Image (cartoon, rainbow, N blue to C red):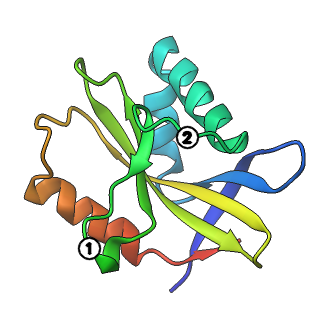
Amino acid sequence: MKRKAIKIKESVDKQRAIYIDQTNYKLIYNYLTQDPRHIDKFRFISSIILEGLRNTEVYDKEGFDTQTKGVTAMKFFKGQENDRIYCKEYSHRGKTFIVVVCELLEKKKTTRLTEREKNIIKKVASYDYEF
């Protein structure tokens, strides 16, 4: 069954867009709005994505095998709370690059991927979206 995603931001040239998983929207929205630092960091990471820039300190691939290719993470406050929002990247109709904000993980404790993180990444990789 396809999941629904809501468009929240788009680049000026409409070649890149950020969507949010409709099912997890409330949880992610509450996280982002509970602290002004969270929303500021989200806006910063979103602008990097929409401008087509690369900054692996705040947004990078998280897939660890061929099945989880295309899963990425927005990294919030590394060395502090170390929260993550796991995302899935798509190329829509070959011309629009889409990042879907999918799952929130608060307080990642290790530099390696634990079974907890791997399970979330696998879950995100299994999502199929309707745009």
- Report the side of 24 relative to 20 (left or right): left
Is 3 situated above or below 34? below
- Looking at the rendered image, the quarter that the C terminus falls into is bottom right
Labels 2 & 1 near each other (Cβ < 8 A): no
User: In this view of the protein, which residue sits in the foreground, 69 or 36?
Assistant: 69
Find numbered disc 1 in the image and state the secondary structure of the residue it sits on: loop
Rendered residue at 90%/49% (across/down) = 13
Q: Position of residue 34 (x, y in %)?
A: 45, 20
| Residue 54: mark | 2
Q: Which amino acid, mark 2?
A: Arg
Residue linked to disc 1: 65
Rendered residue at 81%/56% (across/down) = 15
Q: Position of residue 106 (x, y in %)?
A: 27, 35
Tell us which disc is closer to us: 2 or 1.
2
- Report the side of 109 relative to 84 (left or right): left
Q: Residues within 10 Å of mark 2 (few under 14, many from 20)?
A: few
